[in-house]
Image (cartoon, rainbow, N blue to C red):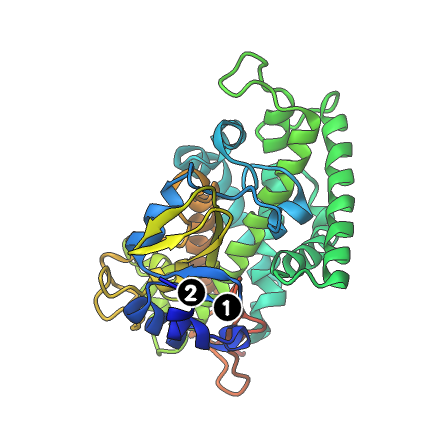
Amino acid sequence: MAREAFPVGASVTLDAFHLDPYPWYSRLVREEPVSWVPAAQMWFVTSAEYCRDILRDDDRFVVGFERSTVRDILGEHMMSVDGERARRYKRAHQGPFLPGSLREHMEPRITTIARELVGSFRDRGQVELRSGFASRLPVLVMLALLGLPAADELLMRRWYDALEAALANTEFEARTRELGKAAADEFHTHIRAAVRQLRSDRRPGTLLDDLVHAAADGPSGRLSDDEIVLNAGIVLFGGISTVEALVLDAVWALGQTEGALEAAVADPTTVHRAVHETIRWMGPVQTAHRMATTDVEVGGHTIRRGDMVACVLAAANRDPAVFEDPDQFRPDRLDSHQHLGFAAGQHHCLGLHLALAECRVALTELVAALPGLRVDPYRPSVPVGSEFRQPDHLWVVWDTVRA
């Protein structure tokens, strides 16, 4: 079928996706689940079934392509290479991210960090949640996980902001790319120095220490210093971007209904469902990009070798073939965990259990310390973004006890 035969795809304007992509996604998933989008010069795949198939097909759909912003800015790491090399990188890093290890080592740290942050503003009765909490929590958690000092927070945040803009810069605007590459270079230099220091000044139980002192005859061998440094960049970015957005999206979505935040953290089951439903309904990461290595038929259409494909996770997560009333936000939905918010296949998100734990702890600690927590109706905000989606600010208020 000729590419001109996709009327919905041909009518897509990417600017509209920044504000509200979901009406477009709804049309695509129902009318053109595989569609050529001229504005993006790539295929948009919105069916949950087709997205899952592509993401699991590591031979015919790869992440290691020339115009990958993730590869251009952060170099070659577990999310920008394929095959055994990617599997080796992921194996080397997975230990601290496994659920048992997270529960034992990281969840107590996450709770401590969250409580300290909430304690810094609990008497105010109001806070801009992004700057006061959601942007700080994952940075401090990632520093603890990597084994870097908490004093690096502002430095990491500056680098992260430049990286976020550059990784979303799919049009390769020169200045944004330049700033992103400069931030990546500074970050890599910082990590390289930390790696050197860890040879004589160990920090057991941290990710960088584990990597530096890994056994050469282990299942992944010992990564080279360059491999450790380059993979640290994607670990840092993924560990910050998803969590910041997820916390903000969850508070925003639950905060639209009185009492929903309190109900969501009533017990571990309800908060677990609420977090998964937030990912399904308002995915922090909207798309996963792949390149076809050969001609492939998907949904009756031929994707040619070298074509770019956007697996639109946010659309797949509202596919009516999978979810009943998919456009409705239901914190108690029983099947919300079937979402594709963390992708699938070889390149599924390494830190998915960490992200879930951070959001669960964040919601629990916020509600426990801030009675009557709610989104401020006088300073409204909405989620925005077509690659990474979250409110750019979120004011919340709560009841304070006065003597």
Residue in the image at 37% along x and 47% along y: 296
**Disc number lying in front (1 or 2):** 2
Question: Does 12 sit above or below residue 168?
Answer: below
Mark 1 vs mark 2, CA separation in Å: 9 Å
Q: Position of residue 389 (x, y in %)?
A: 51, 66
Residue at 41% across, 52% down: 303
User: Is 18 situated above or below 365?
Assistant: below
Look at the numbered disc 2 and give the secondary structure of its residue: helix
The residue identified by callout 1 is 38
- Against 258, is 346 above or below? above
Q: Nearer the viewer, residue 234 or 136?
A: 234
Q: Residues within 10 Å of mark 1 (few under 14, many from 20)?
A: some
The crowding category of the residue bearing disc 2, from other C-alpha atoms within 10 Å (few below 14, some 14 to 19, many at least 20), is some
Q: Residue furthest top?
A: 217
Q: Residue furthest bottom?
A: 378
Q: Are marks 1 and 2 in contact (CB under 8 Å)?
A: yes
Check disc 2 and report the residue beneath it: 3
**Residue 316, position as x, y percentages in the image:** 34, 60
Q: Is residue 383 left or right of residue 345?
A: right
What amino acid does circle 1 point to? Answer: Pro
Relative to residue 403, is residue 35 drawn left or right? left
Rendered position, 343 above or below 120: above
Total marks shown come to 2
Which of the numbered marks, if any, corresponds to residue 67? none
Amino acid beneath label 2: Arg
Residue 71, given in percent of the width and then of the height, sits at 63, 45
Q: Is residue 33 visible?
A: yes
The image position of residue 2, as x and y in percent, is 39, 64
